[in-house]
Amino acid sequence: MSKDDISTLPPGTVALITGANKGIGFQTARKLGTLGATVLVGARDEGRGATAVAVLAAEGIDAHAVLLDVTDQDSVKAAADRIGRTFGKLDILVNNAGVLLDHGIPVAEVTADRLRETYETNVFGTAAVTSALIPLLRRSGRGRIVNLSSSLGSLGVNSAEPERLAPFQMLAYNSSKAALNALTLMYAHALKADNIKVNAAEPGYVATDLNGHQGIGTAEDAAATVTRLAVLDDDGPTATFQSETGHIPW
Ligand SMILES: NC(=O)c1ccc[n+]([C@@H]2O[C@H](COP(=O)([O-])OP(=O)(O)OC[C@H]3O[C@@H](n4cnc5c(N)ncnc54)[C@H](OP(=O)(O)O)[C@@H]3O)[C@@H](O)[C@H]2O)c1
């Protein structure tokens, strides 16, 4: 399906996007909301979540703030419980929340603590949210999970094109996305029988706070790629890693 094929979603579609108060997550919430989904705007800060929801609601989107710090197990459990009580199911989970903490630090100087801190959000946070929400995704009957990865985490790209990636050698961030890709594959295979499709998105290098707005594209462009994977039909792929232009090697 190309992004031009996306029209509207089945009535009652419920989507949770983590880290949706800004950047790619916010634009993905906007896009899914425009397609008719009820969007649950995950944000770790209550005020930032409320501000984002107000913007989306003013555009006619059915948006609700969900307080969610992906590194805090109590927060994850509370969010899952609330979604279960209020909606009884979840159709789309976009694991978008992410951090980049080692930009500009030479690989040899990145500490294990920085890796741990990065993995807390990008890897363990994604696993915590995903496992807490799998029961609600199963109840959907056609759950979709999109993990926000990066070609910087592709072992294939890293081994084939080290010179091109030289300016972007970030030990903690890149390896966290490689681990996220592994999670993506494992969840995809484990959840196939439940008709839950799990894919990783490479959103492109887009200007957001994460990279000090050095990216070339826009968060809106990135959201189109993420949304395409979030609204796959039942005959769509699972266990893939895709950018706007196609498949990326794991
Ligand atoms: N921008 C790019 O070029 C690019 C390229 C490839 C992949 N990605 C991936 O795309 C995703 C979104 O990035 P972005 O560029 O949109 O970055 P961004 O503008 O910095 O947004 C990151 C979002 O994640 C949230 N977040 C961080 N830690 C969190 C936590 N513990 N719990 C809940 N939310 C948390 C942030 O919340 P606060 O506002 O509270 O900090 C923010 O809402 C990330 O996974 C990133 O790795 C981005």
Image: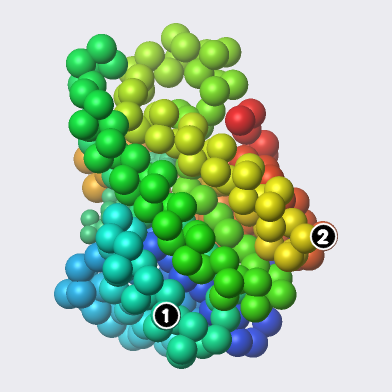
- Is residue 156 positioned above or below 108 on the image? below
The residue labelled by disc 2 is: 235
- Is residue 184 positioned above or below 133 on the image? above
Quarter assignment of residue 27: bottom left
Disc 2 crowd rating (10 Å Cα; few below 14, some 14-19, many 20+) is few
Residue 240 % position (x, y):
67, 43
Disc 1 crowd rating (10 Å Cα; few below 14, some 14-19, many 20+) is some
The residue that appears at 28% across and 82% down in the rendered structure is 54
The residue that appears at 50% across and 18% down in the rendered structure is 158
Q: Amino acid at mark 2?
A: Asp
Is there a contact, CB below 8 Å, between mark 1 and mark 2?
no
Depth check, mark 1 against mark 2: the one in front is 1
Q: Amino acid at mark 1?
A: Asp
Mark 1 or mark 2, which has the lower sequence index? 1
Quarter assignment of residue 195: bottom right
Question: What is the secondary structure assignment of the residue under circle 2?
Answer: loop
Which is more toward the observer, 250 or 28? Answer: 250
The residue labelled by disc 1 is: 81
Q: Quadrant of the C terminus?
A: top right
Furthest toward the right, the residue is: 235
Q: Is residue 135 visible?
A: yes
Whether the residue under disc 1 has CB within 8 Å of ligand 1? no
- Residue 206 in the figure: left or right of residue 227: left
- Is residue 219 positioned above or below 167 on the image? below
Res. 55 mark: none
Q: Quadrant of the N terminus?
A: bottom right
Could you tell me how far apart the alpha carbons at marks 1 and 2 are, in whole angstroms?
A: 30 Å
Which is more toward the observer, 233 or 79? Answer: 79
Question: What is the secondary structure assignment of the residue under circle 1?
Answer: helix
